[in-house]
Image: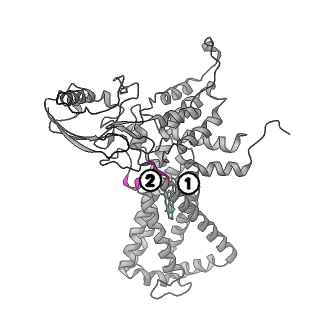
Amino acid sequence: MSSVASVGSRARVARVWQAPIGKKAVMALTGVVLFGFVLGHMLGNLQIYLGSEQIDHYAVLLRSSPKLLWAVRGVLLVALVLHFVSAAQLKSISRAARPDDYRKYDPQRSTLGARTMLGSGLLLLAFVVYHLMHFTFGNAHPDFEELKVHHNVVTGFQEWPVSVSYIVAMVFLGMHLRHGLWSMFQSLGVSHPRYTPALRTFATVFAVVIVIGNVSIPIAVLAGLIG
Amino acid sequence: MRITLHVWRQKNAKEAGSFVRYDVPDVSEHMSFLEMLDVVNEGLIAKGQDPIAFDHDCREGICGMCGFMINGAAHGPLRGTTVCQLHMRKFSDGDELWLEPWRAKAFPVLRDLAVDRSALDRIIAAGGFISVPTGSAPEANALPVPKEKAELSMDAAACIGCGACVAACPNASASLFTAAKVTHLGLLPQGQPERSRRAIAMVAAMNENGFGHCTNLAECEAACPKAISIETIARMNRDFFAASFSSRD
Ligand code: HEM
Ligand code: FES
């Protein structure tokens, strides 16, 4: 036995969560999970270009193991909740830290997207709820057929206001990811003059790829390229 | 040249403040910003009015006493410069400038443009020091310090504690200030014995003193008169996580 006592693990976790740096680490780690999902989801979506059989088959495949499906959904839900709770708590800390705001404030370095992460995040939350009601549960869809993904997507996006709302949401997702994808490294303590600029470029490129990949689908439907 | 100032006038932390307009004719481009305010104040005193309060001391960019917002930018528009080292030649005839104090819960307004920054001292007191025996100086060459570490440590040690990082941050975070101290001491052999406790205690002190969190916007880095990099913040985060999970306390 060591002669130096050690703080217990529960106290350690509490101490990290207490610190805003710890909450940011939670945001970064849950952000990685959500980003992984967004990437996988886009790759899944793009199968719509391979024809109705392919994507409908993919939907059946995803549902082939209910246990696995619900495990993944559980992880995503927990990540989203932790991400949201951290964001809300951090916002209340920073709001309290500047009760009297500047009458004039001129940002010198940061992008609008980086300063409005909470706004884009809340919009994404609203979008996620709508999106689930639209294509997963179907109760916000005019002509929903279980597991007929191709049909659901085409009939869903033929209503142009729906397509527009998806496109707008994806632009916000792109803004969120453009800052989030490099910011998470900084939050976790990874920064280097050699790699960080490359990381920021990577974040921008990736955000653009995600937006274009997803946005192409409603546009293709509206243009009559998928039908 | 002629400059129009809108200066935040506030009697103390309790009373509400507001902008007061001053027309300043005959500003010489060779004046420093503070000298220009000195001239305004002489005029106010001659008229029996209260001069504009602002902090200053060295007026050569090394003490960290001066600082306020000019048109929404901490220490004004010039990068890597305190407001005492900012000269009127950076402005043009007819410019309209809005001067506000650093705004943060942790920095209560003392009067006009002067704020109480002792919250930064409390962060230092929590861990921004090394414990060495007093007495004669040790032999300088007895303790090797790698060149790169010495340089990086010195870059961080350039922090003069002016508070511009807090002022410029949309979250009023003191992360750059604290990270500069954690980096400066944590990179040197003399800073090792207290490194874990320092990271934990200083991070906790930021929170306890009412500063906000870091959202990696780098507004602090842009405002810092010593151009200290937010790379130091990543280093502080790293030290904090390492200390939180691997140290015994
Ligand atoms: C519930 C909805 C969401 C809200 C309210 C939200 C809010 C936020 C906020 C406020 C930040 C910045 C935190 C800070 O800088 O202090 C952030 C960061 C981040 N978000 Fe979200 N977000 C949401 C959804 C998402 C989604 C769906 C993704 C992924 C596709 C995502 C990925 C990220 C990433 C990677 C970061 C970077 C973490 C960091 O800065 O360390 N977020 N989020
Ligand atoms: S007065 Fe000393 S830094 Fe400006």
Which SS does the magenta portion mostly show? loop
The residue singled out by tag 1 in the image is A28
Residue contact between numbered discs 1 and 2, judged by CB atoms under 8 Å: no
- For image coordinates 68% across by 48% down, the residue present is A12
* Amino acid type indicated by mark 1: Ala
Element on which disc 2 rests: helix
Where A85 falls versus A109 (above or below)?
below
Q: Which mark is residue A95?
A: 2
Decide which of B92, A8 is in the foreground and name it: A8
Where B33 falls versus A98 (above or below)?
above
Q: Is mark 1 within 8 Å of ligand 1?
A: yes
Answer few, some or many: residues within 10 Å of disc 2's Cα (few below 14, many 20 plus, some between 14 and 19): some
The colour scheme used to paint the residues is one colour
Quarter in which the N terminus of chain B is drawn: top left
* Amino acid type indicated by mark 2: Arg
| Circle 1 chain | A
Instruction: Specify start and end residues of the magenta stretch as a single range.
Output: A93-115
